[in-house]
Image (cartoon, coloured by chain):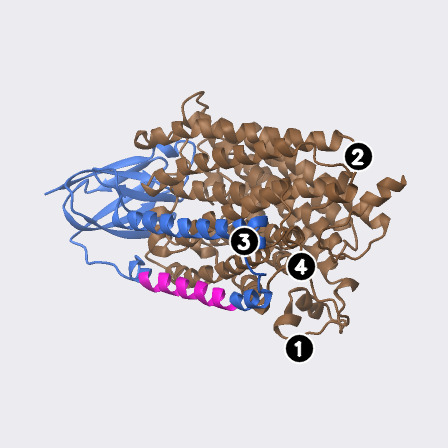
Chain colours: A brown, B blue
Amino acid sequence: MSTEARTVSTPALPYDDSPVLDEATIKKTTSIVKRYMWTATLFLVIAGILGVVLRQSQADIVRTDDNLWYALMTAHGLGAFVAWAGFFLMGSLYWILMRLGFPLRTYIFAEISYWSMVIGTLGIVWTTVIAGFGASWVALYPLPFYSQGKWSDAATGWFSFSVLLAGVSILTWCVALIVAVTGPAIQSSKNGWLYKVGLALGLATLWPSRFKHSGERKAPYPLIPITVIAINMFLMTLPFALLLVLMIIQSIDGSFTTDPQFAKNLLWAFGHPVVYLLLFPVVANLYYFIPRYAKRPLIAGRVAVLAWFVALITNCFLWAHHMYLDYPDEGAQWLLNTIHEPVTFAIVLASSVSIYALSATIFKSNFTWNAGSKFMIAGIFGWLTAGFQGVLNADIQFNTVLHNTQWVVGHFHHMALLGMGMVLMGVFYAVLPHLYHKPIYSEALADIHLWGMLIGGYGWVICWLIPGLEGAPRRWAVEPEAWDVWTKASIPFLALLVIAIAVGLYNYVRTITGSPFTVDVERVASV
Amino acid sequence: MNATQLTITVMYCAVTAIGVVALAAVIATTRRSKREAGSEPNIEKMERGENWWAIMTVAILVILFAATFAGIPWLNRANADSTVQVRALQFAFVAQPASVPAGTIDFEVKSDDVSHGFALYDPDNVMVAQIQVLPNVTSTVTAKLDKPGPYTIRCLEFCGFNHHNMIGRIEVTQ
């Protein structure tokens, strides 16, 4: 390794308290992070193409076969949400942990997580696009076994197995994170594993008489959302894994059945927390990067820690807000739904306090504006504006008119792409110089990428939100004529969005194929 | 739009406008001219502000919860003038009777096969009510139908390859 390369392998940051790590750790972690990020980006391309096919078909440009449309919808949903955004952010946390001085202590879990996600995703693509499984990503039981001849029970079994592999990926990732955050770097005054988890959750700030660090360094703030999501996803992936196993058994033995209402609860016990598989890692990234752009520590205190502790608990008990409109005459689902409304509201606190903390950190700071920071700020705007929609969705009265309308489609595309996705793309711009020791190819192209996504993206989601407010149904291959105008109006915005993302991908690729840093290494490499 | 849809639209636009302007104002303070013109930010004060921010957030959520509690459909069901039994199956709705006089109507919906969504739209295509329909159990939704004319039932839970053609009708008379 040349002297210059060694210099840029750990570039100085404007504000940085990262411990110095050995070259082997940096090299190994960097290699895994690159793999996660680029594989996820490949899945973005595939899922994105499927999304374009779906929307243009609804706009009646080239109409697809009805079942194929629903099969592509199934692949697009899982591909974009889990295999792109989730997978990318999973990889990004390995890098954040390393920079915080909490590198992975063993790479085996990260490797299992990587390969199970890749194989699972390929299985999902095969069972949907080739075998015709088109029951949507939620595969609402018992629909997978009522295909009307469009796909076989074997396809249902293999689809369930493929999704189960993605679940294994999430579970092993959680283990990798927990093992890392409870390592020696936590500076614990006691040896107990749970005690160290408590320290990683920031409880030394919240409850100093009970939780103490052995050294002066407290758990850094990004560690808190990382620990929360690791615990949450480990616990809440298990119910869905059980449902998938039950469906696999039924695909083999048709006489075996499950109660649909129980199955729906199992599904959503995972189905909502998985949203935070994106949001909490995004917050961890923002907690890491924004103070470094602002050149001051994150302005947060005990309330932030408390809000995250509330999020840790409530994330395990809020799934029924996806079932507000399931209140059959028999049973007590209505009671669960009623309880889950205030619980869902409670999780808003973590987002609200985080946005305050980030805003206060930015306020009157000598902020570094570059491709990474611009995308992250745009992402905070998206998080804020889509977050308000989430609060409305969480209200039972409002949900009676919003549920399963195009408003929901607008909301999650807004949150996932214009909120989380924007931050994610900013993270890519921010870490590429560190991963490859090369400067971003073009800040001008990054600006085109940014503004194209903003104009195209917001125009595109508004064309779902407005008809959704009017009651337009979601997941219709052929939409009612009354709202057709919005579908057609969305196409130019979608085209702009696609072009913008293509420009971004070109910029990323040219960055890693470009020349290494030659001048002013520290300035260019700084986040 | 019905009254709830209109409330959501107004609330969302207002809150979003406030949020975006406030965040943009924070971003604007990072400009050199702004930084040099004003005083240094008081970090301790901003840290204390976190407490008030959290209290404000909780207060807003409590108010929202209280203000909309009366709108929870299973807690506040009106007495019905008549009842319509609806069978939902891939890919049709069968309503019995298919014609009812205007008034408050109970729709007792049951699915023969998979989960469906029962959503009722008035003659002006405004959503009046909806409920999820699980297989083999009855789900009842109550709706006040004032406007005479043809009402459209649409399936709002994805139920298979012909989901978008799962449309039913009932007639509301004077």
Secondary structure under the numbered disc 4 in the rendered image: helix
Secondary structure under the numbered disc 3 in the rendered image: helix
**Mark 3 vs 1, N-terminal side:** 1
At 30% across and 51% down in the image, what residue appears? B7
Q: CA distance from mark 2 to mark 3?
A: 40 Å
User: Mark number for residue A210?
Assistant: 1
In this rendering, is residue A60 above or below B133? Answer: above
Q: CA distance from mark 4 to mark 3?
A: 18 Å
Q: State which chain disc 1 sits on.
A: A
Q: Is residue A218 left or right of residue A354?
A: right
At 54% across and 53% down in the image, what residue appears? A273
In the displayed image of the protein, which residue is found farthest to the front? B37
Q: Which residue is mark 3?
A: A273
Q: CA distance from mark 4 to mark 2?
A: 31 Å
Res. A351 in view: yes
Residue A377 image position (x, y, % from top left): 56, 46
Q: Which residue is mark 4?
A: A223
In this rendering, is residue A65 above or below A38? Answer: above
**Mark 2 vs 3, N-terminal side:** 3
Circles 4 and 1 on the same subunit: yes
Q: CA distance from mark 3 to mark 1?
A: 29 Å
